[in-house]
Image: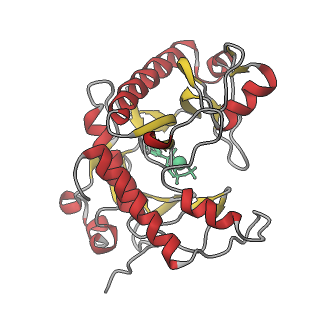
């Protein structure tokens, strides 16, 4: 069976689909393991577009693997393998379709909070700051501009909303959900991961303005990093050479998509319009460029 150039959705016979997210399809492999498949779906303005972005799933997977390895000294993570050679037969049966875009991971009990770290003022953080002068209970200096770097990175957790938008919460609220001790651990790990990644990326031309981590408890009762890590989908990446506070920054990966969609008379509600081939190709190039800048090698 030939494998299409892009994949919008998977349906893997013999494996139980446990979740279809905006971008990833998650399958149960056995009691202890999940298979996370990154498709080439792309969303903009919270709508999934009918056009896929070639190689996107591969970039998300390879970039997560890169960060998992690089940050392992700070926290252990769920990745078992990307190379499916040693995976169970139920997974290997789909090897051609899954190559490069899937991770076999340890299944965990997921903490129901998004562990967001912000180093710069953007998105909902900028919105909250403008209306209250704070983000998630962090009082910030007056007079900051949109996209300004914060005096120090802050931990700004959010609830995981099943539908609609995640809600920013204070650390005190997070303590009520996962306990004070776990909150402090997740905060400290998140801040340490962000600090190391931000410094690393900045030296390579990418500002990681903010990012979201997820954590879970593994079978041994240890907290580990799960999901994807420090990808353009879970973070705001800004090109360093265009950085200018006082305005919104172009997003590293979705700039061409958003710019194109803004030229249309579309109300930003589903169904979203398709992308022209050149916009999709330019977006693939951006994903590959982010990978190359961060890892120093071509995918
Ligand atoms: N190791 C793991 N154990 C259990 N669940 C996980 C693990 N890693 C990721 N997940 C879950 O898998 C899902 C990934 O799908 P995704 O496409 O990111 O969904 P969403 O649209 O909710 O972001 C998330 O719900 C995430 O919490
Ligand atoms: Mg997700």
Q: Quadrant of residue 281?
A: bottom left
Q: Quadrant of residue 154?
A: top right
Nearer to us in this view, 227 or 54: 54
State how many labels appear: 0
Please provide percent x and percent y for residue 94: 31, 72
Q: Is residue 43 above or below residue 121?
A: below
Nearer to us in this view, 89 or 214: 214
Taking the image as shown, residue 60 lies to the left or right of residue 210, namely left
Give the residue drawn at x 40%, y 21%. 192
Nearer to us in this view, 46 or 251: 251
* Image quarter hosting the N terminus: bottom left
Taking the image as shown, residue 39 lies to the left or right of residue 65, namely right
* Image quarter hosting the C terminus: bottom left
Give the residue drawn at x 40%, y 24%. 195
Please provide percent x and percent y for residue 12: 42, 71
Q: Is residue 287 above or below residue 176?
A: below
Give the residue drawn at x 56%, y 21%. 150
Please provide percent x and percent y for residue 296: 23, 47
Q: Quadrant of residue 70?
A: top left
Please provide percent x and percent y for residue 216: 45, 34
* Residue 284 seen by the camera: yes
Q: Is residue 10 above or below residue 113?
A: below
* Residue 10 seen by the camera: no
């Amino acid at each position: 069976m030939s494998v299409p150039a892009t994949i919008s959705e998977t349906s893997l016979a013999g494996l139980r689909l446990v979740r279809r997210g905006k971008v990833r399809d998650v399958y149960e492999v056995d009691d202890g393991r999940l298979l996370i498949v990154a498709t080439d779906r792309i969303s903009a303005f919270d709508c999934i577009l009918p056009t896929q972005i070639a190689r996107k799933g591969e970039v998300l997977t390879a970039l997560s693997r890169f960060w998992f390895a690089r940050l392992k000294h700070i926290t252990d993570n769920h990745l078992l393998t990307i190379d499916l050679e040693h995976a169970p037969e139920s997974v290997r049966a789909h090897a051609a379709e899954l190559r490069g875009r899937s991770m076999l991971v340890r299944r965990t009990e997921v903490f129901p909070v998004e562990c967001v770290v912000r180093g710069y003022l953007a998105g909902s953080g900028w919105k909250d700051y403008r209306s209250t002068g704070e983000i998630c209970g962090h009082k910030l200096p007056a007079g900051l501009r949109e996209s300004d770097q914060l005096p120090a990175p802050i931990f700004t957790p959010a609830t995981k909303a099943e539908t609609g938008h995640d809600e920013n919460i204070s650390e005190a609220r997070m303590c009520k959900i996962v306990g004070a001790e776990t909150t402090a651990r997740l905060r400290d790990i998140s801040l340490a991961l962000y600090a190391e990644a931000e410094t690393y990326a900045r030296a390579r031309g990418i500002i990681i303005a903010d990012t979201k981590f997820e954590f879970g408890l593994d079978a041994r009762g240890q907290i580990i990093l799960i999901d994807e890590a420090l990808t353009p989908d879970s973070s705001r990446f800004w090109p360093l050479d265009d950085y200018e506070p006082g305005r919104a920054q172009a997003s590293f990966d979705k700039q061409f998509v958003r710019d194109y969609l803004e030229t249309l008379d579309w109300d930003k509600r589903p169904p979203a319009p398709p992308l022209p081939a050149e916009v999709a190709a330019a977006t693939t190039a951006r994903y590959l460029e982010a990978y190359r800048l961060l890892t120093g090698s071509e995918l």
